[in-house]
Image (spheres, rainbow, N blue to C red):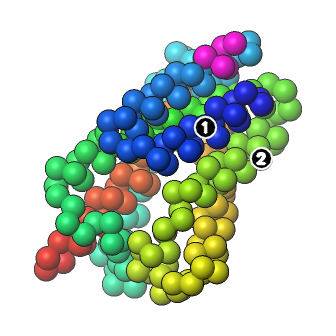
Amino acid sequence: MGLTVAVLVAANLALHRWSGLFGLVTAVVVSVLLLGVLRWAGGTWADAGLARGTLLRGTRWALVLIGLVGAVYLVGALLPATRTLFEDRRYDGMSGGELMMRVLVRVPVGTVLVEEIAFRGVLYGLVYRARGAVWATTVSSLLFGLWHVLPSLDLATAKPALNTVFGDSAFAAVLAVVGAVLFTAAAGVLFCELRRRSGSLLAPMGLHWAVNALGYVAGFVLSLPGE
């Protein structure tokens, strides 16, 4: 497991620094490398949640979860009380082409693929083999939360709803990061439970993609003039 964590630390720094095509290639390389670590440690495709016999069940789970997230986002975007949660300054000037690139390429490859293989695939599988589901969920989720420290450094200023709560001070930025880490760690617990119940990595992959990608779509649509 130590080698896996070392790869994750290096990958986190690299992916935070690099974007665009180089970042996508890095995500794919890291995913393949982590699967190689799992195989080197004696793990199987089943340990990674990618056994052939579980793919159909995992696909069904993923489709249902995507539909549920889409319905929740639709209601949230229509209600005035929750619509402001989708506001994000990162949508300013974004084109439809860039939105599609994020939804269809950057999110599934640069985020979902590498993070799910890392945390609910390889890391979860290795710890599960040694210590069981509780330890696997705990370790995976804690590290998943810490993985989001760097991406959340500018979160309080990017999202007006958070800026209203936390303000612009350094202390407020720290609180925003801590909140992001705790939230993503909690999300990690849910992703791990989906992985355990479905037996497939495709279930948390589907939910992870829906939360990120459909969130981009909702925020983009609400940022359009006249919306």
Residue drawn where x is 82% and y is 33% of the image = 132
Mark 1 = which residue? 10
Compared to 145, does 157 lie above or below? Answer: below
Dot 2: element: helix
Q: Is residue 148 left or right of residue 160?
A: right
Q: Position of residue 203 (x, y in %)?
A: 52, 38
Q: Give whichever of 191, 116 is nearer the camera.
A: 116
Q: Is residue 39 magenta?
A: yes
> Bounds of the magenta span?
36-40
Mark 2 = which residue? 138
Residue drawn where x is 47% and y is 47% of the image = 17
Q: Is residue 167 left or right of residue 214?
A: right
- Mark 2 vs mark 1, foreground winner is 1
Pick out the residue farthest to the left.
Answer: 226
Q: Position of residue 107 (x, y in %)?
A: 38, 45
Q: Is residue 4 magenta?
A: no
Q: Give whichever of 118, 154 is nearer the camera.
A: 154
Compared to 83, does 23 lie above or below? Answer: above
Q: Quadrant of residue 192?
A: top right
Dot 1: element: helix
Magenta-highlighted stretch: main secondary structure? helix
Q: Quadrant of the N terminus?
A: top right
Residue drawn where x is 73% and y is 27% of the image = 3
User: Which amino acid type corresponds to the residue marked 2 in the rendered image?
Assistant: Thr
Q: Quadrant of residue 51?
A: top right
Q: Quadrant of residue 95?
A: bottom left
Q: Tell me if residue 115 can be seen.
A: no
